[in-house]
Amino acid sequence: MKKRANGVSFGIALWLVLHSACSLPALAQQNRVTPAPTQTQPASSQESPQEDINSPGEVVIEGRPILIVYETLGGLTPQDRASGIEKRILAVAKESSSSPESIRVESRSTWTEIFSDKQLLLAVTDFDAKRAGKPRPQVASEYAENIRQAIRNYHEEHSWRLIFSGAIKTLLATLVLVPLCWLVRKIRFALRDRIEKQIQASARLEQKSPWHISLAYLGPISLGVGAVLRWLLLLAFVEAYLTITLGFFSSTRVISHTVSKWVFS
């Protein structure tokens, strides 16, 4: 009886061991964590609407910037728009009958047009105003006033009165420069001849004083220094002349352009 109980106990223990050995792989498989699948959003939801990334176009009339456009319109980049606006404004300014007061503003739903009489010069869009940081009516009003001032400046700078005034002042500056250069040349030649004569006279003396000896060495040096000083003085005169007449250069250019147009027309 005792042996039978021992056999039963041994059988139960063996069954428990085998059951545990078979259950461990399944338990490990259940405890293993599987990563959750990542969800990717559609590319269309991640991309934000792309705004106009073109660099702005600046309208410059006679070297003066007057306005800036930012938006691409009708396939024209801001630079292309600025180039066309410059040509239209210059065409209006070159007309002798054009008046700055003919510049007017007409507002539309999403843009504002600036006219010269019946000719459209440019359109200011909401995007242009947004990039400028101001309301569209204010931007259009400022641009219109800048165009009026550009036309006034063009008329004043290309008037015959201003052209002749600049030409006369340039002529006076030239009449002052030429005698000054001639005077410097005469003084330099007179001093050079005198020093060379003294050098030659001291060289013929048999008994030379310390003055004659020093003159033999210092004379050529003084001639070289005099030549350098002469060129420096002439350069200073020319620089002053260019500084004075630089403001009249545009007038001189306008004169030549106007005369050539009148001769060959």
Image (spheres, rainbow, N blue to C red):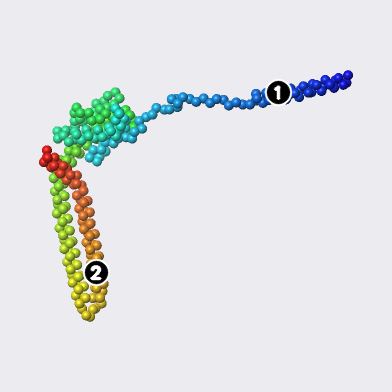
Task: In this rendered view, identify the residue nearer to me: 188 or 17.
Answer: 17
Residue under numbered circle 2: 220
Q: Position of residue 261 (x, y in %)?
A: 13, 40
The amino acid pointed to by label 1 is Ser
Residue under numbered circle 1: 23
Q: Position of residue 112 (x, y in %)?
A: 27, 27
Q: Position of residue 96 (x, y in %)?
A: 14, 35
Tell me if mark 2 has few (under 14), some (14-19) or many (20+) residues whose alpha carbon lies within 10 angstroms of its own: some
Q: Residue at x 21, y 76 (%)?
A: 203
Query: Element under label 2?
Result: helix
Is any part of residue 138 visible from this angle? no
Left or right: 91 with respect to 17? left
Cα separation, mark 2 vs mark 1, equals 118 Å
Taking the view exactly as shown, the residue that stands out farthest to the bottom is 207
Q: Earlier in the sequence, mark 2 or mark 1?
A: 1
Q: Position of residue 139 (x, y in %)?
A: 29, 31
The amino acid pointed to by label 2 is Pro
Instruction: Work out which quarter of the rendered image holds the N terminus and state it.
Output: top right
Left or right: 228 with respect to 3? left
Task: In this rendered view, identify the residue nearer to me: 30 or 219.
Answer: 30
Is any part of residue 197 visible from this angle? yes
